[in-house]
């Protein structure tokens, strides 16, 4: 596992997510498709036992793949994201096109009217300062009614630290993709080089890694109770070989 010393850590722009979640994102993550979203949401909503018609907020909804399944299941679904490119793709779907809001997770434009807030596929921990990430968590919790449920889908830190793949290279649609990964302090940094006809562009992602005790403590400071941690959307136990850490809790 590659671990940078602090003085060797590469420079990361604080707003790296503005470029990372642009037009290239659906191409780079095309394996995260509608089928995988349907499986995840179906298992999750069975676990949460939310009735059809419940109002659900998809925080950092991206191109809306989870929203589509939630709408099909009969939920009153709303989504928000910062990326205009991804929101434009989501708006191509008539069932959700009028339920999309462009907003920063640090300043959510909603009152506490939601029965559940979902933050899926490593969409938390983007900010360099812990107080900003904590503020984003408080904003999500603040959208919930009393007894509303929050769900945060994170990388399982212990598994990643033990199994990090430092570099991969592949050819895809005439492009060469070289991905570099490293753990830098309490963050995982991913640099993707996209080479086309001899020209290279680079995208950087940098996400805060949370251990079980850290994320539990953060949720508790935001007023969340009944916190549980799982290894998958179906509620299976969190084990050393779990790649995801699904965190759920309730606003009292």
Image (tube, rainbow, N blue to C red):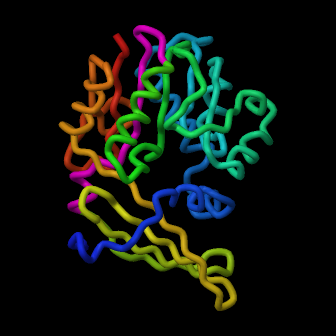
Query: What span is in magenta?
Result: 144-162
Q: Is residue 151 magenta?
A: yes
On the rendered structure, is 252 left or right of 118? left
On the rendered structure, is 60 left or right of 168? right
Horizontal and vertical percent position of residue 220: 26, 24
Determine which quarter of the picture holds residue 200.
Answer: bottom right
Relative to 194, is 118 above or below? above
Give the prevailing secondary structure in the magenta stretch.
strand
Relative to 110, is 28 above or below? below
Q: Is residue 1 visible?
A: no
Determine which quarter of the picture holds residue 186.
Answer: bottom left
Question: Which of 217/162 is in front?
Answer: 217
On the rendered structure, is 128 left or right of 72? left
Q: Residue at x 56, y 60 (%)?
A: 20
Horizontal and vertical percent position of residue 68: 67, 33
Question: Which of 209/158 is in front?
Answer: 209
Determine which quarter of the picture holds residue 38.
Answer: top right
Q: Which part of the image, by quadrant, shows the N terminus?
A: bottom left
Q: Is residue 241 visible?
A: yes
Relative to 37, is 167 above or below? below
Q: Residue at x 33, y 41 (%)?
A: 131
Q: Residue at x 43, y 35 (%)?
A: 136
Question: Which of 148/101 is in front?
Answer: 101
Horizontal and vertical percent position of residue 110: 58, 22
Q: How many marks?
A: 0
Question: Which of 52/202 is in front?
Answer: 202
Horizontal and vertical percent position of residue 104: 56, 40
Q: Which part of the image, by quadrant, shows the C terminus?
A: top left
Q: Is residue 95 magenta?
A: no
Relative to 122, is 50 above or below? above
């Amino acid at each position: 596992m590659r671990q940078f010393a602090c003085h060797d850590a590469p420079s990361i722009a604080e707003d790296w997510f503005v470029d990372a979640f642009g037009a290239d994102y659906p191409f780079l993550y095309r394996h995260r498709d509608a089928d995988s979203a349907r499986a995840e949401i179906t298992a999750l909503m069975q676990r949460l036992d939310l009735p059809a018609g419940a109002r659900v907020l998809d925080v950092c909804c991206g191109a809306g793949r989870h929203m589509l399944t939630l709408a099909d299941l009969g939920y009153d679904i709303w989504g928000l994201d910062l990326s205009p490119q991804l929101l434009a793709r989501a708006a191509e779907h008539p069932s959700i096109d009028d339920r999309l809001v462009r907003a920063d997770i640090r300043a959510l434009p909603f009152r506490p009217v939601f029965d559940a807030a979902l933050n899926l596929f490593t969409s938390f921990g983007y900010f360099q300062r812990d107080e900003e990430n904590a503020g984003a968590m408080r904003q999500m919790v603040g959208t919930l009614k009393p007894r509303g449920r929050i769900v945060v889908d994170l990388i399982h830190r212990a598994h990643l630290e033990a199994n990090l793949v430092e570099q991969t290279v592949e050819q895809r649609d005439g492009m060469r993709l070289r991905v570099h990964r490293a753990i830098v302090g309490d963050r995982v940094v991913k640099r993707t080089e996209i080479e086309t006809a001899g020209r290279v562009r680079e995208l950087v992602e940098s996400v805060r890694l949370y251990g079980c005790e850290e994320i539990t403590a953060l949720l508790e400071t935001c007023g969340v109770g009944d916190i549980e941690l799982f290894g998958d959307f179906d509620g299976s136990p969190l084990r050393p070989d779990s790649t995801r850490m699904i965190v759920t809790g309730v606003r009292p």
